[in-house]
Amino acid sequence: MTITVIGHGYVGLVSASVFAELGNKVWVIGHTPEKLERLRNGDPIIYEPKLADVLKKNNEAGRLIFTDKYDQAIKESSIVFIAVGTPPAADGSADLSVVYEVAKKIGENLGDQFTVVAGKSTVPVGTNLEVERIMKQANPEANVAVASCPEFLREGSALQDTRVPDRVVIGSNSKEAIDQLLELHKDLPGKRVTTNLASSEMIKYASNSILATKISFANLISFYCEKTGADVEEVLEAVGMDKRIGRTFMYAGIGYGGSCFPKDVQALADTGKKIDINTGLLDTVESINQHARANFLDHILEKVSGKNIAILGLAFKPDTDDIRFAPSVYLIEQLLEKGYNIKAYDPAAMDNIKGKFGDKITLTQTALETVKDADALLILTEWGEFVNIDLSKVKSLLKTPLLFDGRNIFDPKKMKDMGFTYVGVGRA
Ligand code: UDX
């Protein structure tokens, strides 16, 4: 097939690469010439393990074509995916302005043949119908059907998640559109779920919201554990052994960050308020997430006596350089405001943190250099490099062996035996 993907962020570029890998010709439309040139040269721009290899291979095979022009790409394509950003607006709703801008351009460039326009961006229920209205306004003759085909990839494992999905969700009110999308996905494993347009749009928000809910629930239990002498890891391990519950995505810590959970929970709550639904659960999921960071900060402020703090881990999770809504950003802002000096290190997110804080904090080249002479060490992301760090070296380099583990990667007993003052999340 020949298809078009509009947008080359995580969702757009990874989806385009996997569809190209399956043998399709894939146009990728962007609007920044400099970025398109980098993509043509095999630089994925985003940090995602192994993506550069796939990009290079498919560029060379001529299956991926990057352009800022809609005309030829849209006319040649039987399926067009919209995979542009839907960032949170100031009131928590999803900002759909780019989705609608793109819909107008697609409409203006549609040819005579039947075209499926499928949303991959996470958008509130009803958005794809509005996309259809805008396209038909731009082109009343348009032979087009809209669909929703949400993507469930995670940063850091995006290629694998897209190549081996648990399920492929395809929603449309047009049978022809569903058939075309099933055909495009035919070589991918995973269950097929076909629904109407609204259900498909809801599936994505419901999935992200239940995952965020599990995390906030784990954090809520961690608050109880801290005040009662229970240990959250022991508690959740046993709770998760019940097959009806499961342990996945139920790890306490300093809360979820990233480009999806914070914005999607808020956007679903915003939609609920507009249609008169009690969104208390979603509002609480969000406020517990905020409290997880604030609670961790309180422990730091209470226990650290000097002013020099070392931080290991800045990305919102391992295997990414993304710091959007990362707990590290909140904690650094708060600690700077209170007059602490910060030295920090992350295997991938240094440029992004530098862009955010400039020379207000000191960025180091290695983990061990970071901890030298610090009054306390904070671990904020569970990168493998930190899980396997030489703890006796860390202890000998720290001025005070005080360690705050925001991801519960270490065993409290072992840490105590080594002579650390260890503060995990929700640990006895
Ligand atoms: C998420 C969804 O998992 C994915 O399906 C969707 O398409 C996009 O949003 P992503 O944001 O890339 O993916 O990362 P994810 O691995 O889900 O982690 C999100 C945040 O939750 C991270 O900050 C992580 O540290 C935190 N988390 C995750 C926890 O605090 N506890 C957990 O048990 C799991």
Image (spheres, grey):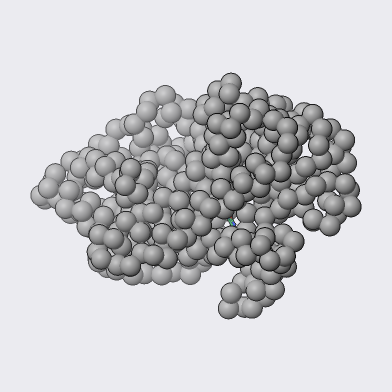
**Image position of 142 (left or right of 181):** left
> Which residue lies at the image location 66% right of the left edge and 68% below the top edge?
236
Task: Report which quarter residue 184 is drawn in.
Answer: bottom left
Q: Where does the image place residue 417, in percent across and percent down from the top left? A: 89, 52
Q: Where does the image place residue 21, in percent across and percent down from the top left? A: 51, 48
- Above or below, 353 against 251 in this view is above
> Which residue lies at the image location 61% right of the left edge and 72% below the top edge?
246
Q: Quadrant of ligand 1?
A: bottom right
**Image position of 187 (left or right of 170):** right
Name the residue furthest top: 359
- Above or below, 212 against 336 in this view is below
Q: Where does the image place residue 391, in percent across and percent down from the top left? A: 84, 43
**Image position of 4 (left or right of 191):** left
Q: Is residue 295 visible?
A: yes
* Number of numbered discs overlaid on the protein picture: 0
> Which residue lies at the image location 44% right of the left edge and 41% below the top edge?
9
Q: Considering depth in this image, is 184 or 425 the residue closer to the camera?
A: 425
Task: Report which quarter residue 333 is drawn in.
Answer: top right
Q: Considering depth in this image, is 228 or 270 the residue closer to the camera?
A: 228
Q: Where does the image place residue 339, in percent across and percent down from the top left? A: 61, 28
Location of the C terminus (image quadrant)? bottom right
- Above or below, 105 against 233 in this view is above
Name the residue furthest left: 140
Q: Is residue 58 visible?
A: no
> Which residue lies at the image location 16% right of the left edge and 53% below the top edge?
133
- Above or below, 107 against 245 in this view is above
